[in-house]
Amino acid sequence: MTLPANTRIESIDLLKGFVMVLMALDHVRDYFHYSAFFFDPADPTQTTLPLFFTRWVTHFCAPAFSFLAGTSAFMAGKRRTKAELSDFLLKRGLWLVFVELTIVGFAWSFDVQFRTYGLRVIWSLGISMIFLAGLIHLRRVYILAFSLLLICFHNLLDTIHFPGNFFWDMIHEQSVYQMTQDTRIVIGYPIIPWIAVMPLGYYFGGFYDKTFDSNERQRLFNYIGVSAILLFILLRFTNWYGDPTPFKDYGTFSKNLMSFLNPNKYPPSFLYLLMTLGLALLFLANSEKFKGKVVDFFATFGRAPFFYYILHLYLIHLLAMIFAELSGFGWQKVIFSTWIGLEPNMQGYGFDLWVVYAVWIAVILMLYPLCKKFDIYKRAHKEIWWLSYL
């Protein structure tokens, strides 16, 4: 069975929506859990299993969404010439970089002085689109080769350092730069290997062509997904290659499990991408026939991802200010001059993990009707060009 060319692929929207919902959990944790201001929730020496897995499940969000953005770009290219698609990706990429430094940056901090500029996930998506705008003019096999070479071998760069070199850090090292006494840039998402993940998704978009059998696609995605997971397990267990943070034996099962499942995210190591994209492909392979209200619920967020992303940041931050005021901490302290986890004024603020989950569920339920209405409006007004930027 093949999908008609004009049929929207529900499994892609479902996975997009699912990871967007999970992403909100991590961001609620950032603003509400007391650990966010004391230690890394993925650190086996300090965290707990519930807190660790609260963080771990959200590792899949950025890789899956970047990959699917490439897949969506391939499908959008069916309705455009290569030149038109390249122009769209370039403009969309520049727009996302601008949004990261303005609308998104303000949502994280509520700082009208803009003392911290963060190069985070929206920035990485924008830069990846700019690179993809050029890569789509190559043959698909060359796009695949570029993606695999960068994803598989970028960890060879881990031992190369140029201290104080902003451009090198922007390429491959997470860092903080103090530009002036009051202004800093946080490089959270160096561009390598993110600029290879989206083109890889673009290549895989070809498997959704109407000429490609869906059963064969399922077998292929399952094979690649299982192979990626097995390779992750082998390399992680042996510490042979693929991650600058080795798996350690802490002497207890729980700590060992957390260490094993915690490859490096900033930048995402080869093992991190094997783990996350491997599971994403398994999900895509086995979810095409999923139907029902639950699927529609999550797919709604997947059809309005950018709209949802902006709203959820502002809503979470506003709720954090309300909770801070009601708990006697003071809403003014939830206006940040730096990244939330580095803010010294937040020491002493925070709630138990069950509060994080309660707020997360409330955020999702509040945003669902808004995303549903926006999705309906967007699909009914495809002629409005600027809606494609939301």
Image (cartoon, rainbow, N blue to C red):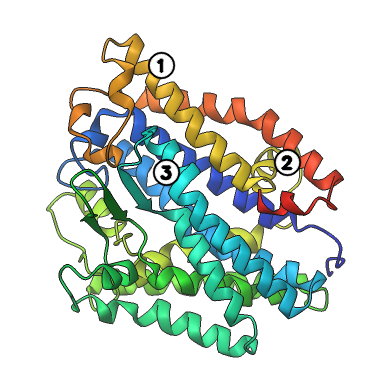
Q: Amino acid at mark 2?
A: Asp
Q: Which residue is mark 2?
A: 296
Quarter of the picture holding the N terminus: bottom right
Which dot marks residue 105? 3
Which dot marks residue 322? 1
Q: Residues within 10 Å of mark 3 (few under 14, many from 20)?
A: many
Q: Is residue 117 left or right of residue 101?
A: left
Between the C-alphas of marks 2 and 1, the distance is 31 Å
Q: Residue at x 37, y 60 (%)?
A: 189
Residue 337 % position (x, y): 27, 36
Residue 78 % position (x, y): 79, 73
Q: Is residue 372 left or right of residue 101?
A: right
Tell me whether the residue at label 1 lies in contact with that at label 3, contact meaning CB atoms closer than 8 angstroms.
no
Numbered disc in front, either 2 or 3: 3
Element at badge 3?
helix
362 lies above or below 142: above
Mark 2 or 3, nearer chain start: 3
Q: Residue at x 40, y 38 (%)?
A: 108
Q: Amino acid at mark 3?
A: Gly
Residue 293 % position (x, y): 74, 36
Residue 330 % position (x, y): 29, 15
Element at badge 2?
helix
Between the C-alphas of marks 1 and 3, the distance is 20 Å
Q: Residue at x 26, y 79 (%)?
A: 157
